Amino acid sequence: MSIIPQPLTEFPWRILALLLAIAGFGTIVLYSAASGNIFPWAAMQAVRFCIFSAMALTLSRIPVEVFARFAFPAYGAVLAALFLVELIGGVAGGSQRWINLGFMQLQPSEFMKPIIVLTVARFYAMLPVGEIRRWNAIWPALVLIGVPWALVLIQPDLGTATMIAAGGVTVMFLAGLPLRLFIGTGIVGACAIPIAFSFLHEYQQNRVLIFMDPESDPLGAGYHISQSKIAIGSGGFWGKGFLQGTQSHLDYLPEGHTDFVFATMAEEWGLLGGALLILAFMLLFRWGIRVAMRTQDKFARLAAAGLTTTIFFYVAINLMMVMGLAPVVGIPLPFMSYGGSSMLTVMLCVGIIMAIDRAGKRRTGTGNWA
Amino acid sequence: MKFLTPKRKIITEAAQSFTFTRRAMVVGGIQGAIGALLVGRMAWISVAENEKYSLLSESNRVNLTLIPPRRGWIVDRNGRPLANNRTDFRVDLIPQRIVDADATIRHLAQLLNLQPDDVDRIRDDLEKSAGFQPVQVADKLTYDQYAAISVRLPDLPGVAPSQGFSRHYPAGATVGHLLGYVGAATAEDYKANKDPLLITPGFKLGKDGLEKAFDRHLTGKAGAKRVEVTARGKIVRELTTRQDTPGNSIKLTIDAGLQEYAGRRLATQSGSVVVIDCQNGDVLALASMPSFDPNSFSDGISHLEYEMLSKDDHVPLRNKTLQGLYPPGSTVKPMVALALLEAGIGPQETVSCGGAIRVGNTLFHCHKRRGHGSLNMRGAIAQSCDIYFYQMAQRIGMDRIASMARRVGMGQKFDLPFPSQSYGTVPDPAWKEKKYDQKWQVYDTVNATIGQGYMLINPLQMAVMAARLATGKQLMPNFIHNARRPEPATVGATEEHLVVIRDAMNAVVNGGGTGGAARSSIPGVMIAGKTGTAQVRRITMAERAGGVRGNSSLAFKLRDHALFQGFAPFDNPRYAIACIIEHGGHMIRNEDAPMIASDTLSYLFDPAKAMEKLETLEKGWGGTPSERQAREMAAFRLAKAIEKGEVAPPSDNAADNASNAATPSPAPPPPARDESDNDVPPPPGANMTDAP
């Protein structure tokens, strides 16, 4: 340890290698999805990964306190953007999820995913220890989560809304709120599902119904799920081989390079590729949770665990959707699906966790040495 | 801040930290569990259900297109094709692959000599075509045209030349009614039988005639082409191809040469010729003219051509050999004579013909106004004397005549491979009672003995009658070569009686009788036969008083039918023939039934000589039937164009032709059925005349 200079030991080699493996695999899959072409997707995805990796590494140098301090202002800014989107959408007529900044399409709800975690973590970090079992510990968090959740839901974007709620609630759970609250809410929620269902948009209801029975409408709304399952199922254990997927290359699989990229991968790489990819993601989450458990600072540990869970929700919801275990909601698979917004968000999470990791190591390091 | 700590449960930093660690472990555990669940789910889909999804994936990827099977050939008794398949070269455009549509079409138009209206149609189709549906540019290309396009393919993206098969009838119109034609399946066909082959482009069904009757036999097994397609239906590549199995061929009893000869020999007349082999009943020719050309029907007939055919008063759309019903006229006389012999009347018994006879209170005339004088049976048949038969028939009664008529095949429905046939009537008292609820009258017998009144026959039945009179055996008409059939029953006449009849029929042609025109040109072959004239109008007393009007002064539809039945050689019958000319009226000697029949029979003995005569004659008629029809078609098209004002009604030659051709169209309304088909004959008691 002493031979290698400190900056190098501090550099998060292992986690970067893991991310590089996942994103590299994703790029290979996108290369195949474009019928063996690095354009239009694979090259762009690789470039983005490099840029966002650099961004994550930069973030990792920022002291954790900065994130804590900017959590509320950032929350306010994104919330304002969400309102703005809603207004523009109202004027333009129909649903709108982004603000056109000229050079890129900014989708504020995407940013809300990590920000809500930081904000709720910040709130509980500020909350006096003894207050945790009081009503005062619950309602502010619920408001913080509820407002963006409602705004995103009416966009309507069920997937993102669910992720915002899930991210916030996970932090509440980790903060130590009484367990009975979650169990009770869970039971009430289960009872309320039918009522909530009736409030969904018709196309959302259809998606849910078709998810229950995709074969009922294989050419219509169930088409995505049916074709995705066919792609995964026909891949078998070893897969059809690189560039040999028919479902994706002959356009039977819709969104084969974005939301359903996992099916594209599974068709060619089989169960083997799928299991390895899921294992890689699990290693990433294990690292995140371990960082959280090592950390003593309240905000930092809540943020680390919460952000890890946010990435986890991406992966879990996407894979469940692709395998026919969840309705079709537009949640991409991190590092695999083509698209800048999701990668940016995930890399933000990773960068902050790396910053927390670094801060934690420093502290223990100094403690040992001083 | 410590003072705010609740009293009941003390929560410290350490306790909260411990809670966090525990809960973080729970969260991590749940994440791991869900990860395991996902791997398990994936394993279930991809390993346990792999077979199911692999199959679905294959059925997505692979598209099966059927290749229409080649239709079995129809060949004549000597193996000459009557219907075969011609290689058909065609060119299509695949809209989605075209780079520059205008340039491509221009190039194609130049290569294939496309007409401007074809080019317009292609442009229209191209605009309307959705996605990958090919647009036909042209079919029936020559090999050279096909090759010219094939070599330029690299410069013509989106152009797809291909090769298929289409039905071809070498003899054209002369086999139209015999074989029928083929055509694409209709929506009803597909509804009745959801065979995907029916909606495969290029697949044709038998629509009429033998093509329809033997459709299943002629249809082969479809081939299949497996192609890889994208979700939008674009063909990526061909995988495997299974060739089609051609249908079985059929060998007919028809003699292709004779069939074509008979069709051409019918000249410009509306008529039919049937030839039967006296050895076994094989039908050697079954010609009905004029006819449609089955080649143009099978390719999808144009509107105009169909209109022309359906307006023609020579009814080219009706198969007269089976669906035409005519009063047999005097052609029944040999049959009646055979019945007389059977009833015990001697061949030498005579009747004196004075030109007319009173039956009841009606006067029945002989066709010869001055009368024939005294005649025996031979003379009565040879001269076709009506009075002899009026008298003799009254002696034996209708039932015995009707019995003989049925035994020689009149009114009999044969088991034939044709979708429809009309079979004539043999009237007798029981029949009239049942049909009209009226008693049989003597004048009914009188009418029937000369083949008028209720009596009706179709040309095939007439040929069967000739064959049975010639052989004394109840031969059954047959179309399938080498078909197995039972030994025919006898007609029930003695050989002695048959000799009398054959001798008398010989006298008709060779003994100064009414059928001299049928005299054979082949040395050593004598033709025997019987002429007939079937009247389709009533001759009033007034007209008879002023002289019966000649056929040439009458409208086409009012002229008499001309009939002939016979066989050759007369002493050892080998072939029997029937010929009926609708509204022929015995006006043109070389287009009349006896000579047509005689020439057709001569083809069987000396084809070269018969052909030579026909070709000479055809020069006078304006060429072969197809040449004449093509000219008619051109004239009709021009007339239509003038009618629509597309072409200026002109002052030159062309206009004369056009107006000539146009005359038939405003003529008598639907020529569907003429008087001779009516079940109700001219009212009994009319003054019946019978001519040779």
Image (spheres, grey):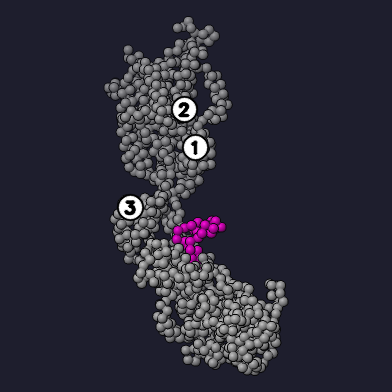
Q: Where is mark 3, residue-wise?
A: B101
What is the quadrant of the C terminus of chain B in the image?
bottom right
Dividing the picture into quadrants, the one containing residue A64 is: top left
Against A257, residue B607 (above or below) is: below
Disc count in the image? 3
The three-letter code of the residue at mark 1 reads Gly
Q: Secondary structure at mark 1?
A: loop
Magenta segment, which residues? Answer: B180-206
Pointer 1 indicates a residue of which chain? A
Q: Where is mark 1, residue-wise?
A: A324
**Image disc number at residue A278:** none
Q: Where is mark 2, residue-wise?
A: A154
Q: Is residue B393 left or right of residue B317?
A: right
Residue B487: percent from left, percent from top: 61, 80
* B201 is within the stretch colored magenta: yes
Residue B112: percent from left, percent from top: 33, 62
Against B149, residue A240 (above or below) is: above
**What residue lies at 41% left-to-right and 39% top-to-bottom?**
A255
Q: Secondary structure at mark 3?
A: helix
**What residue lies at 32% left-to-right and 35% top-to-bottom?**
A44
Residues at discs 1 and 3 in contact (Cβ within 8 Å): no
Pointer 2 indicates a residue of which chain? A
Label 2: how many residues lie within 10 Å, few (<14), some (14-19) or many (20+)?
some
The three-letter code of the residue at mark 3 reads Ala
Q: Are marks 3 and 2 on the same chain?
A: no
On the question of residue B33 being in view, the answer is yes
The three-letter code of the residue at mark 2 reads Ile
